Image (spheres, rainbow, N blue to C red):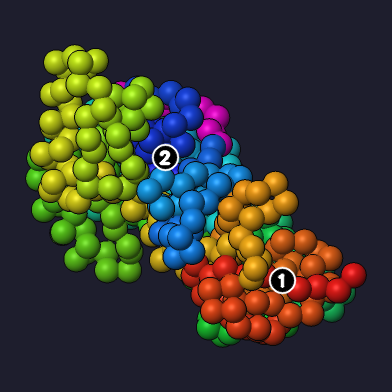
């Protein structure tokens, strides 16, 4: 799974990315610091199942801290997009292309209102973040329209002349954006488009088609960043009323980054997403660090119950995309051959079945599937059994 971090310049995308991955992204207070997409691994947080078995797990990927399991997801930090990006403004075309493979988007906006539409620093509170929300929708839709309409006449003519199915042909053309035949079929039906006469599709129909496909393939959560600044909370409430179709999560990427770095340096104990931290080495903290930690405690953690960054990732994967986390495990033992307890945890689309999971583990397990065991209840289940979030499953397969 790939989650793209998007937004205009200077809203805090790289800070969010670095806080989520602790990778070495450049952070600075001016636009266009990022010129290549940063790719990294972030983590979603779940209550680990190890506790229910009275064990401590040994993850092969990710980590587990106080029975909170952190499962890896791929993140990309894309350079800032400006209005007109779809026409190539600010290298927009190239930046948009970096998003093709994304399964979901985290749209970072600036609640402080201290950056204009180009990301330039202005008087705090003088820019309405609602504009951030609107502009990105337009740019993404225009980008999709551009791809759909590229060589459309020739495409439509060939489809008609060769009696091709327009759905299949279009799905092929758009597969790079993760558009499927089913999505196109659904959109065509909804818009009452004539499949026999693609040459007659109108401009406004292309627009609606682009919006529908963009919403399906790039579902978006909004990370309302800089929640630590004055009036940010009122602004966020207003945005929620203005845009009920979006899931907004307030966050302070800068606070999360400071906490993670302090934890990494051994100064504090902090589990990402929690509402508190403890001082681990008071003697090593200088005045500036103490002040920063006090600020974060009072203005972020105590006010909002967390820095919000972990929440954004978790909600993107589990609410927006509706994924579930599944652990492979044996009904009689939870260890792998090297003695690691519950070493793996996989993220699967909702409604995944036992058979889907078998294929995810190994094609041979899928092909030779006999039955599965729900390890928590020890019940035997069949191919079609729908898995639930945090299930532990053993696959029994033939040779
Ligand atoms: N107050 C506050 N400032 C933040 C927060 N997150 C980021 N910033 C500041 O916002 C500025 C821009 O941060 P970046 O992470 O470089 O922004 P970006 O969106 O990646 O910018 P481009 O790469 O130019 O598109 C920096 O000065 C950050 O310190 C936050 O949560 N609160
Ligand atoms: Mg950046």
Q: Which residue is mark 2?
A: 20
Residue 196 shown in magenta: no
Residue shown at 22%/35% (left/top)? 278
Badge 2: residue crowd in 10 Å (few <14, some 14–19, many ≥20):
many
Where is residue 299? Give x, y as percent: 12, 40
Asked which secondary structure carries label 2, the reply is helix
* Neighbourhood count class around disc 1 (C-alpha, 10 Å): few under 14, some 14–19, many 20 upward: many
Q: Which residues are magenta?
A: 29-39
Q: Quadrant of the C terminus?
A: bottom right
Q: Nearer the viewer, mark 2 or mark 1?
A: 1
Which residue is at the front of the view, 82 or 323?
323
Q: Which residue occupies the foreground of this view, 147 or 391?
A: 391
Quadrant of image for the N terminus: bottom right
Residue to which mark 1 is pinned: 395
Q: Visible in this render: residue 250?
A: yes
Q: Is residue 134 left or right of residue 159?
A: left
Q: CA distance from mark 2 to mark 1?
A: 33 Å
Q: Is residue 37 left or right of residue 235?
A: right
- Is residue 38 covered in magenta? yes
Q: Is residue 399 left or right of residue 9?
A: right
Furthest residue in direction right, as rendered = 399
Q: Is residue 290 above or below residue 229?
A: above
Q: Residue at x 69, y 77 (%)?
A: 372
Look at the numbered disc 2 and say if its residue's Cβ is closer than 8 Å to ligand 1: no
Up-down: is 305 above or below 284?
Answer: below
Mark linked to residue 306: none
- Residue at x 16%, y 59% (from the top left corner): 237
Identify the residue shown where x is 51% and y is 27%. Answer: 35
């Amino acid at each position: 799974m790939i989650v793209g971090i998007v937004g205009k310049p200077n809203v805090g995308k790289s800070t969010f990315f670095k806080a989520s991955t602790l990778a070495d992204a450049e952070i600075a207070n001016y636009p266009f610091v990022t010129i290549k997409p940063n790719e990294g691994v972030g983590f979603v947080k779940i209550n680990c199942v190890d506790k229910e078995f009275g064990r401590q797990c040994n993850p092969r990927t990710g980590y587990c801290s106080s029975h909170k399991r952190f499962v890896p997801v791929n993140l990309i930090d894309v350079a800032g997009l400006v209005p007109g990006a779809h026409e190539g403004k600010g290298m927009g075309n190239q930046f948009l292309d970096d998003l093709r493979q994304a399964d979901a988007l985290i749209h970072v906006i600036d609640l402080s209102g201290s950056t204009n539409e180009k990301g330039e620093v202005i008087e705090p509170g003088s820019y309405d973040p609602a504009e951030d929300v609107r502009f990105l929708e337009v740019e993404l839709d225009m980008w999709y329209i551009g791809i759909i309409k590229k060589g459309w006449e020739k495409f439509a003519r060939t489809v008609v002349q060769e009696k091709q199915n327009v759905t299949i042909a279009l799905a092929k053309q758009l597969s790079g954006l993760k558009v499927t035949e089913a999505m196109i079929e659904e959109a065509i039906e909804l818009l009452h488009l004539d499949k026999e006469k693609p040459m007659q599709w109108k401009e406004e129909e292309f627009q609606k088609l682009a919006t529908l496909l963009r919403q399906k393939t790039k579902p978006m959560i909004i990370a309302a960043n800089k929640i630590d600044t004055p009036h940010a909370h009122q602004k966020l409430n207003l945005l929620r009323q203005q845009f009920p179709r979006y899931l907004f999560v307030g966050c302070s990427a800068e606070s999360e980054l400071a906490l993670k770095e302090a934890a990494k340096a051994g100064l504090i104990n902090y589990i990402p997403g929690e509402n508190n931290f403890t001082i681990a080495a008071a003697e090593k903290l200088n005045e500036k660090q103490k002040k920063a930690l006090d600020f974060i405690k009072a203005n972020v953690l105590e006010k909002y119950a967390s820095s919000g960054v972990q929440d954004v990732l978790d909600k993107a994967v589990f609410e927006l995309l509706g994924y579930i986390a599944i652990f492979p495990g044996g009904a009689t033992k939870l260890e792998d051959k090297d003695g690691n307890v519950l070493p793996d945890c996989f993220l699967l689309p909702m409604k995944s079945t036992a058979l889907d999971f078998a294929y995810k583990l190994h094609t041979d397990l899928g092909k030779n599937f006999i039955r599965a065991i729900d390890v928590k209840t020890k019940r035997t289940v069949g191919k079609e059994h729908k898995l639930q979030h945090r299930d532990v499953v053993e696959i029994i397969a033939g040779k």
